[in-house]
Image (cartoon, rainbow, N blue to C red):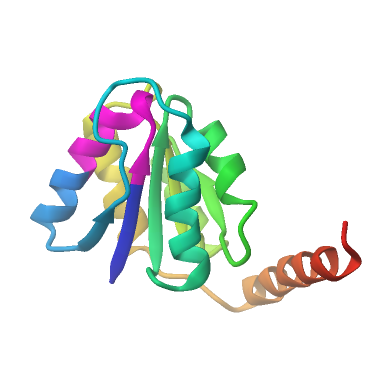
């Protein structure tokens, strides 16, 4: 599995920790930046990661900003992206199990390294349950298609 990782300045420290974890787990990734703590605009990095997921160039993405809220807003604008803000283990598990989330979003100013490690591990290893949840995801896809064709 190949994933894309990105952050803004507020998420940089946590992104670096997550990148180290991905390396230790031998997970292939693309680092989409940012690469420092100088102030940047989170939509720029959310767009890079979400675009790769949306196009199918990577299977999943991880985004980190100060709270995770801004990155979630950006990511969920992209077709085929199901981004989930997870600052706890239960949300990480359920986002995969029931929602087949393909972008994990975390708040760099909300959680610490140890919790982030556990969230990433849980999110990466939890499969999609399928079953009744497929019907629900298909409804989301239909809404997305309807909005695209109606020009709304």
Q: For residue 36, what is the image quadrant?
A: top left
Query: At 80% from the left edge and 66% from the top edge, which residue is drawn?
Result: 148
How many badges with numbers are in the image? Answer: 0
Task: Kindly identify the residue that appears in the image at 24 percent across and 35 percent down.
Answer: 35
Q: Is residue 1 above or below residue 152?
A: below
Q: Residue furthest bottom?
A: 131
Name the chief secondary structure element in magenta: helix
At horizontal 48% and vertical 45% (from top left) the residue drawn is: 46
What quarter of the picture does the N terminus occupy? bottom left
Indicate whether 113 appears above or below 101: above
> Which residue lies most toward the left here?
24
Q: Looking at the picture, how far across and down is residue 6, in whole percent? A: 35, 44
Q: Is residue 83 left or right of residue 143?
A: left
* Left or right relative to 99: residue 6: left
Residue 134 in the image, given as x and y percentages of width and height: 64, 76
- 8 or 93, which lies in front? 8
Q: Which range is magenta?
A: 6-18
Q: Is residue 15 magenta?
A: yes
Q: Nearer the viewer, residue 17 or 55?
A: 55
At x 51%, y 55%, the residue is 95
Q: Establish if 17 lies above or below 143.
A: above
Quadrant hosting residue 142: bottom right
Does residue 135 appear in the picture of this structure?
A: yes
Image position, residue 64 (x, y; %): 39, 37
């Amino acid at each position: 599995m190949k994933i894309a990782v990105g952050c803004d300045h507020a998420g940089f420290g946590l992104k670096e920790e997550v990148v180290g974890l991905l390396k230790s787990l031998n997970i292939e990734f693309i680092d989409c930046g940012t690469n420092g703590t100088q102030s940047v605009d989170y939509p720029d990095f959310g767009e890079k990661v979400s675009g790769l997921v949306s196009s199918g160039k990577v299977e999943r993405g991880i985004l980190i900003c100060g709270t995770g809220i801004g990155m979630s807003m950006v990511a969920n604008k992209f077709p085929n992206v199901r981004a989930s803000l997870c600052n706890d283990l239960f949300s990480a598990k359920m986002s995969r199990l029931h929602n087949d989330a393909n972008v994990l979003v975390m708040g760099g100013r909300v959680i610490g390294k140890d919790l982030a490690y556990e969230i990433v591990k849980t999110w990466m290893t939890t499969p999609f349950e399928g079953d009744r949840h497929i019907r629900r995801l298909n409804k989301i896809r239909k809404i997305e298609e309807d909005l695209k064709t109606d020009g709304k």
